[in-house]
């Protein structure tokens, strides 16, 4: 799930929770035995919220179904409401604790589905209209010019609310041309130029079954630029990596490089963890922050913080906050001078900070801003990013995620220098492994190893 999809999914999720709470409190106000909820009512409300979140998870209510038809989504909502109603009814009959609150229960189980359905229909229509006007759309090229490509073109023309703007078609194989020739923008040998020229957000591969070599070329090109890929039809075993099958009308589509954090719940829990963990660190370590700031100012003139520009999620530039550890630093935006062992620029306090990674502590502010995560691939400077993009296959895939303060590569001894081919490949391999195998427990493990692991600090200087 892309960032825009996650944002829309979270919007629907947040609106439903808000309406659930609002409907319950309104029902309490008008139909409850008292105007304000008591302790029991608050427990019931919390239980219903947890129940709705669980139903949404198992019904996949807030997943990528944003691209399914309105009818499909509304039917799924109705089924979810009936499950909620059934569980509440069983609980009412079994416990009988709500005899005095019968009117409250009736008002809620009727009011919530009706109001939520109306609001969701309004949101769906509003987002569809915005996409028809060119807001929240994805620039897309379709690789292929045959029947499958033509069907995709027809489907997007018939459903402009899905938010896809087709920049054109790419000729890649000996196919009979069934798409408008004026919309053919080039051939597969020009794919890198076309992706950059049209500022492509997504590539859709629509080639015949015998074009596996061309499909792999297209995927490699998209991976090189760190952009999303969808494949039609579903060739199992071709990609050798995680994927997710979705539907565009009557067509099956493979979402290549599907990762666990594409799930709205996984992304939500990781973000909540990032916020609470970062707040905790900044509060608990505030005396340490003040001491470090004092020592930096005491030892050498200059700012307390070093704020280099690094490459973040989706290749976007972000300003990263660090405690200054050098007398003077490389250019914050376009610097190319990496730190080396016994670097003469490093101050006395800076050497201590770098050894124990204390210079990275201000990046918890980046986490609160949403630029970074506590755990993820480390952000690189633009120069190094470009170099590794050119030399390491699949490197840009790591930008599917937010960069992290610490990561799987760092706790396995691949922090610091990237001077050799082995260092660059191993760091990338570990970053991609983390991307494909993420879990909240893995994040806890990496944080533990960051603090106590032997390999983490071996190459710190």
Image: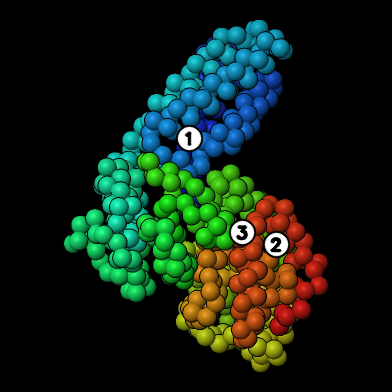
Graded by Cα atoms within 10 Å as few (under 14), some (14 to 19) or many (20 or more), the crowding at tag 3 reads some
Closer to viewer: mark 2 or mark 1: 1
Q: Is residue 123 above or below residue 140?
A: above
Residue 315, percent from left and from top: 47, 67
Q: Are marks 1 and 3 in contact (CB under 8 Å)?
A: no
Q: Residue at x 44, y 68 (%)?
A: 213
Residue situated in front as seen by the camera: 167 or 114: 167
Residue drawn at point x = 42 percent, y = 32 percent? 72
Q: Decide: is 133 above or below 89.
A: below
**Image coords of residue 193 (percent x, y):** 33, 74
Q: Which residue is mark 1?
A: 15
Instruction: Please indicate whether residue 99 sits to the left or right of residue 138 in the image.
Output: right
Residue 106 seen by the camera: yes
Residues under labels 2 and 3: Cα distance? 35 Å
State how far apart marks 2 and 1 are (Cα). Answer: 36 Å
Q: Quick one: 387 or 329, which is closer to the camera?
A: 387
User: Is 303 on the left or on the right of 167, as rendered?
Assistant: right
Residue to which mark 3 is pinned: 436
The residue drawn where x is 57% and y is 23% is 83
- State the CA–CA distance, disc 1 to disc 3: 30 Å
Res 272 visible: no
Q: Which mark is residue 286?
A: 2
Q: Where residue 413 appears, x then y in whole percent?
A: 73, 75
- Residue at 57% over, 56% down: 242
Q: Earlier in the sequence, mark 2 or mark 3?
A: 2
Q: Secondary structure at mark 2?
A: helix
Q: In the picture, which quadrant includes the C terminus? A: bottom right
């Amino acid at each position: 799930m892309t960032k825009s999809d996650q944002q829309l999914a979270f919007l629907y999720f947040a609106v439903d929770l808000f309406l659930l709470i609002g409907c319950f409190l309104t029902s309490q106000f008008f139909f409850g035995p008292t105007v304000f909820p008591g302790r029991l009512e608050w427990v019931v409300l919390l239980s219903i919220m947890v129940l709705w979140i669980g139903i949404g998870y198992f019904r996949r209510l807030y997943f990528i179904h944003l691209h399914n038809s309105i009818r499909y989504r509304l039917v799924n909502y109705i089924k979810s409401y009936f499950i909620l109603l059934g569980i509440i009814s069983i609980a009412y009959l079994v416990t009988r604790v709500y005899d005095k609150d019968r009117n409250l229960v009736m008002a809620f189980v009727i009011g919530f589905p009706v109001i939520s359905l109306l609001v969701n229909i309004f949101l769906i229509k509003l987002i569809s209209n915005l996409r028809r006007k060119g807001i929240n759309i994805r620039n897309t090229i379709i690789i292929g010019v045959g029947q499958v490509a033509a069907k995709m073109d027809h489907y997007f023309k018939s459903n402009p609310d899905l938010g896809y703007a087709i920049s054109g078609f790419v000729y890649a194989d000996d196919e009979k041309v069934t798409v408008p020739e004026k919309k053919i923008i080039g051939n597969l040998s020009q794919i890198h130029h076309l992706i950059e020229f049209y500022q492509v957000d997504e590539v859709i591969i629509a080639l015949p079954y015998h074009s596996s070599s061309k499909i792999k070329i297209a995927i490699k090109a998209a991976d090189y630029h760190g952009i999303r890929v969808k494949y039609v039809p579903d060739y199992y075993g071709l990609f050798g990596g995680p994927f997710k099958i979705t539907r565009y009308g009557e067509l099956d589509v493979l979402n290549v490089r599907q990762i666990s954090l594409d799930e709205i719940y996984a992304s939500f829990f990781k973000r909540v963890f990032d916020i609470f963990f970062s707040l905790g660190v900044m509060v608990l370590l505030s005396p340490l922050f003040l001491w470090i700031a004092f020592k930096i100012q005491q030892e050498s003139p200059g700012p307390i913080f070093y704020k280099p520009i690094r490459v973040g999620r989706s290749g976007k530039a972000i300003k990263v906050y660090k405690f200054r550890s050098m007398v003077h630093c490389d250019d914050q935006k376009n610097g190319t001078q990496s730190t080396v062992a016994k670097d003469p620029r490093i101050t006395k306090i800076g050497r201590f900070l770098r050894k124990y990674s204390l210079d990275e502590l201000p990046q918890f502010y980046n986490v609160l801003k949403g630029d970074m995560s506590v755990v993820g691939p480390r952000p690189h400077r633009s120069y190094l990013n470009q170099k590794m993009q050119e030399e390491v296959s699949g490197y840009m895939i790591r930008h599917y995620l937010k960069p992290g303060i610490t990561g799987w590569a760092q706790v396995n001894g691949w922090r610091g220098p990237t001077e050799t081919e082995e260092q660059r490949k191993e760091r990338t391999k570990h970053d991609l492994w983390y991307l494909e195998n993420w879990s909240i427990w893995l994040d806890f493990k990496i944080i533990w190893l960051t603090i106590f692991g032997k390999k983490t600090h071996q190459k710190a200087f």
